């Protein structure tokens, strides 16, 4: 029996990548996954469009057609798992429509109340939220934790660059990298965002966070560890959003039908 997958944010940059990943001929040939729902913003010009057509493909059979709908009761009916790349408000509004359907979410910039709502949803269904679905970033997080522990006195600065359309700052991944520094050092360092004016000498302790925005950059992160006499920098560059889509689909296959609780992307990679 194939896994029925819904996509929330289907018309967006990431949503389309997820559709492309799900509807690849090799994936369809294996018969393990099938697109069951595609949801976009109320008022979106894509509502009513056929999901295959949205990414330049055609449904193989008339029964494979899936039209984009707005969020609402029953929008995920028939789904085993939903993959979400949308906006914080959109995710919060969609949660009540999930019921016991598994959720893989990559939406960033979530406020505390939506994180709490994910915890509540995880009482009745499996939930996996990750700031980044690339394998390379998962590895970077591990390396940063080790480096921060090995260089406890080093000043840490995190620099991230994203395309001009990105709405939140710092990126969810930059926050996850700062969390990795904290995990390596066993504490919670203050985070200072950018610098301007007569700020005086750099105090030891705070993690400096810096967000560059522009052009079409998919995502770049560098963590600097600056100490007396030497410096280390660990970085990652994503060259295609397809990386995140493949990671999210991998997570969806792994997550569906697991017991209700919150899961981490790391558990998918290192079972
Ligand atoms: P986008 O603006 O291109 O797409 C947003 C999508 O959300 C659209 O399909 C839009 O129709 C939908 N949407 C907006 N409001 C809605 C509502 N009220 N109800 C239903 N749908 C609604 O954005 P994007 O570049 O695709 O990024 C989406 C999210 O994914 C962002 O938070 C981004 O930071 C995050 N992201 C995460 C990863 C990761 O690996 N975790 C990677 C890339 C992007």
Image (tube, grey):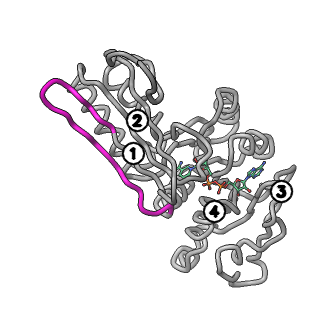
Alpha carbons under labels 1 and 4: distance apart: 34 Å
Q: Which residue is mark 3?
A: 70
Q: Which residue is mark 2?
A: 177
Left or right: residue 98 versus residue 190 is: right
Disc 1 CB within 8 Å of nearest ligand 1 atom: no
Mark closest to the chain's N terminus, 1 or 4? 4
Where residue 237 sits: x, y (%)?
37, 54
Q: Residue at x 42, y 62 (%)?
A: 239
Q: Residue at x 82, y 52 (%)?
A: 71
Look at the image and give the residue range highlighted in magenta: 223-241
Q: Is residue 152 magenta?
A: no
Is the C-beta separation of discs 1 and 2 under 8 Å? Answer: yes
Mark closest to the chain's N terminus, 3 or 1? 3
Q: Which residue is mark 1?
A: 221
Mark closest to the chain's N terminus, 2 or 4? 4
Alpha carbons under labels 4 and 3: distance apart: 22 Å
The quadrant in which the N terminus is found is bottom right
Mark closest to the chain's N terminus, 3 or 2? 3
Alpha carbons under labels 3 and 2: distance apart: 34 Å
Q: Which residue is mark 4?
A: 3
Q: Residue at x 69, y 61 (%)?
A: 10
Q: Residues within 10 Å of mark 1 (few under 14, many from 20)?
A: many
Where residue 248 sits: x, y (%)?
53, 55
Disc 3 CB within 8 Å of nearest ligand 1 atom: yes
Mark closest to the chain's N terminus, 1 or 2? 2
């Amino acid at each position: 029996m194939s896994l029925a997958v819904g996509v929330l944010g289907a018309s967006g940059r990431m949503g389309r990548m997820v559709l492309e990943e799900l509807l690849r001929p090799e994936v369809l040939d294996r018969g393990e996954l099938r697109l069951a729902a595609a949801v976009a913003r109320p008022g979106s010009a894509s509502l009513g469009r056929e999901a295959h057509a949205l990414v330049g493909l055609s449904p193989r059979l008339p029964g494979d057609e899936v039209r984009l709908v707005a969020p609402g009761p029953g929008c995920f009916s028939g789904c085993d798992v939903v993959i979400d790349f949308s906006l914080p408000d959109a995710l919060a509004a969609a949660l009540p429509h999930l019921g016991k359907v598994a959720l893989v979410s990559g939406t960033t910039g979530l406020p505390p109340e939506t994180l709490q709502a994910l915890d509540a949803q995880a009482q009745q269904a499996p939930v996996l939220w990750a700031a980044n679905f690339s394998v390379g970033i998962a590895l970077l997080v591990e390396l940063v934790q080790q480096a921060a522990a090995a260089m406890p006195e080093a000043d840490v600065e995190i620099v991230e660059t994203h395309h001009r359309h990105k709405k939140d700052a710092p990126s969810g991944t930059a926050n996850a990298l700062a969390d990795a520094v904290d995990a390596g050092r066993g504490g919670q360092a203050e985070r200072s965002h950018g610098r301007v004016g007569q700020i005086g000498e750099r105090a030891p302790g705070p993690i400096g966070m810096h967000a560059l925005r522009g052009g079409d950059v998919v995502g770049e992160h560098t963590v600097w560890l600056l100490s007396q006499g030497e410096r280390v920098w660990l970085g990652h560059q994503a060259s295609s959003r397809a990386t995140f889509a493949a990671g999210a689909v991998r997570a969806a296959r792994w997550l569906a039908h697991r017991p209700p609780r919150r899961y981490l992307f790391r558990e998918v990679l290192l079972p």
